[in-house]
Amino acid sequence: MTPPWVLTIAYWIHMLATVIWIGGLAALTFLVLPAARKSVDPSGYAALLGAIQKRFNPIAWLCLALLVATGMLQMSASPRYEGFLAVSNPWASAILIKHLFIFGMVAVSAYLTWWVLPALQRAALLRAAGRDVVDSSALERQEVLLIRINFILGIVILALTAVARVNA
């Protein structure tokens, strides 16, 4: 049995990581990106997006690692947990669906981190060197769309957490 103080710390870290990750996505989605689109020229916008993501991605991946570690601890300590892929109660159903959405969020984050962001950074570097760049606005729109998708997935994950809590 997991000691209560360990679970308390795990819940606290889990909530803190959630607030940082989802809060960061919300800030990007509703504040930073719309303001940047209106006030920064197109070449500077790509550079700004790259700089923001360069700072945000390590934080987001750290939060993800903390969420996985603390979430597994919490799940294994739950009396509703009956084993891997054992879906015999509403709590287990909510947790399984939540994890599917988490995998989707991880996939979107990985695509942003290792494909879209490097492509935007290459375009910004080429533009800064005075070289012709294929229009990067499609990549910028894709990044904004994927950030919004991740934010929506995060909101759904929070809702599924609430469903699981009610059925715990």
Image (cartoon, rainbow, N blue to C red):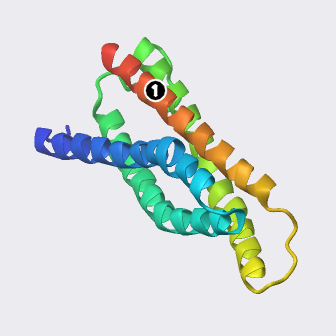
Indicate whether 31 appears above or below 131: above
Q: Nearer the viewer, residue 162 or 72?
A: 162
Classify residue 90 by image quadrant: top left
Q: Position of residue 27 (x, y in %)?
A: 44, 46
Residue 131 is left or right of residue 128, and the answer is right
- Quick one: 165 or 143, which is closer to the camera? 143
Badge 1: how crowded within 10 Å, few (<14), some, or many (20+)?
many
Q: Residue at x 57, y 46 (%)?
A: 34
Looking at the rendered structure, the number of numbered marks drawn on it comes to 1
Extreme residue toward the bottom, this view: 129
Asked whether, in this view, residue 81 is left or right of residue 95, the answer is left
x, y (%) of residue 4? 13, 38
The local secondary structure at tag 1 comes to: helix
Q: Quadrant of the C terminus?
A: top left
Q: Quadrant of the N terminus?
A: top left
Of 16 and 74, nearer the camera is 16
Image point (40%, 53%), residue name: 63
Q: Where residue 24 sits: x, y (%)? A: 43, 49
- Residue 102 or 41: which is nearer the viewer? 41
The relative height of residue 81 versus residue 72 in the rendered view (above or below) is: above
Give the residue type that dot 1 points to.
Ile
Picture residue at 53% right of the left edge, 38% below the top: 151
Q: Which residue is mark 1?
A: 95
In the image, residue 78 sits, relative to residue 14, either above or below, namely above
Quarter of the image where one finds residue 72: top left
Where residue 13 appears, as percent x and y from the top left, is 26, 48
Can residue 65 be seen from the camera position used here? Answer: yes
